[in-house]
Image (spheres, grey):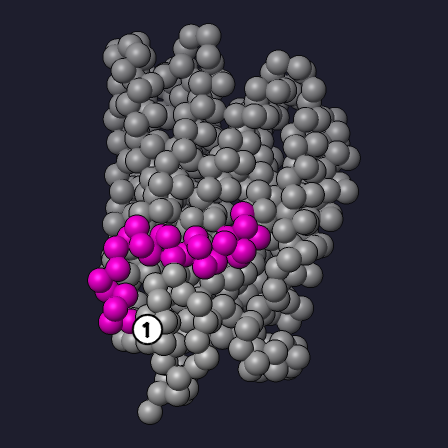
Amino acid sequence: MSTPKPERESATGPAYTREIHQLPDAAPPPVPPQVIRKAIAASAVGNATEWYDYGVYAATATYLTQAFFPGSLGAIGTMLGFAISFVLRPLGGFVWGPLGDRVGRKHVLAITILLIALATSLIGVLPTHAVAGVWAPIMLIALRVIQGFSTGGEYGGAATFMAEYSPDTKRGRFGSFLEFGTLAGFASGTALVLLLNLALDDDQMYSWGWRIPFLLALPLGLVGLYLRSQLEDSPVFSEVEEHLSEEVSISNTAKLKQTVVEYWQPIAIMFGMVVALNVANYTLLAFQPEYLKNTIGLSEDSGSIVVLIGQVAMMALIPFFGRWSDRTGRKPMWWASLIGLFALSLPMYWLMGQGFGWAIVGFVVLGVLYIPQLATISATFPAMFPTHVRYAGFAISYNMSTALFGGTAPLVNEAVVSTTGWNLFPAVYLMGACLIGMVALAFLRETAGCSLRGTAIPGEDPHDAENLADLAGLAGR
């Protein structure tokens, strides 16, 4: 028989609160390892599809500028095309997040990955400015908006899905593979464009070669869609769903209001942490090729090689940092990353300006310092919210912060560097973001080893304190 847990205030009333807290005391049976592996693959491939698009867009920036923004806007127009997709991410989060908490993670993730793959592939068949005039950049931006709206539900859902499938004491280890998918998608896009640059001459790349990487997004997305269709929703979500009969009738608007009103504190904390996370992410991974070309005169291929080497190094290390966070906790990893990036951004950006070899060293150092944040996203952020608002809370906070600060980072950096000639500005911008992240991190509750079950915020249950006290032993089993 279910044992009622203490009530707390709720935007939807005491009866609602009473019902959602009547969950079984016994934990559901452990998820078989093969199912966990399928869940990891389904989440990671979908995330790789999302980031494949960003990698291809960044690596083909020069060709996109020529094809769609040949006038006075130039590279700023291309970066605007990159940034504009983030305007719709918060709206996507407002729609997909509450929907994912109502109907399930699986169904929403199937829709978002399909939309992302279709929008990315359609960029590969767009007419250029020379053919369609002003309609060409308009169509490009429209597809980027669709991508942004879809991504508003993709990333938060994939991270939530993976976190809920992972064992509590191995959430960092398994969750890191979502970000392995991030880097794999980004690196694959960069590598493919580099190979095309080597195989085709400039005229071929500018006329049609740049289209090939975008077209390949569709089969990649279909693979992710197939993998996701083979899984059920996570046991954590299914357990709560069975005890939320009133929740089924709640509209998206009411769900959104409940999430914002009741859980504004974790939303605010996550917002600040994501400022640091995504300014670093989009500065290092999306803006860097253009920066290296314009500031130290590296060729398109050389700039791509620098970024690709850094991405491969990050991919090799990310599972180790994820596993490490299960032993030490998430907060120590974030403190080390934020302090390291704050202290070394200026020296490493100066070093990157000294030539090709030094650019590799500087980029790899900053990439490795960034890894402790990236490796623990799926373990840290979903654990900030209870199950019944986890998808919505994650999607709302993450996408609002990313839209305002992360996705605009390449545009801001390009605009300031090109108008002032201050090549170290990206380092200073990154340092400011790290300061914001440190302030937010100070208010974060440690949740390594905590259960994600039920409708209380992880870490509030007394049993979670016991888990944290024995964290090292638990993670070692």
| Residue at the (56%, 25%) spot, across then down | 412
Where residue 193 appears, as percent x and y from the top left, is: 43, 32
Quarter holding residue 236: bottom left
Which stretch is magenta?
244-271
Magenta region, main secondary structure: helix
Amino acid on which the number 1 mark rests in the picture: Ala
Taking 456 as reference, is 180 above or below it?
A: above
Image-based side of 475 in relation to 223, left or right: right
Taking 400 as reference, is 178 above or below it?
A: below
| Residue 195 seen anywhere in this rendered image of the structure | no
Quarter holding residue 341: top right
Q: Nearer the viewer, residue 259 or 59?
A: 259
Q: Nearer the viewer, residue 465 or 157?
A: 465
Quarter holding residue 35: bottom left
As for residue 267 lying within the magenta part, the answer is yes
For the residue labelled by badge 1, is the local secondary structure a helix, a strand or a loop? helix
Q: Nearer the viewer, residue 401 or 50?
A: 401
| Residue at the (36%, 71%) spot, across then down | 14
Query: Would you name the residue on which mark 1 appears?
Result: 15
| Residue 85 seen anywhere in this rendered image of the structure | yes
Q: Residues within 10 Å of mark 1 (few under 14, many from 20)?
A: few
Total of numbered circles in the picture?
Answer: 1
Q: What is the quadrant of the N terminus in the image? A: bottom left
| Residue at the (46%, 12%) spot, across then down | 73
| Residue at the (50%, 35%) spot, across then down | 404
Q: What is the quadrant of the C terminus in the image? A: bottom right
Where residue 34 appears, as percent x and y from the top left, is: 36, 74
Q: Which residue is outermost to the bottom?
A: 1
Where residue 111 appears, as percent x and y from the top left, is: 25, 50
Taking 246 as reference, is 298 above or below it?
A: above
Where residue 176 appears, as percent x and y from the top left, is: 52, 60
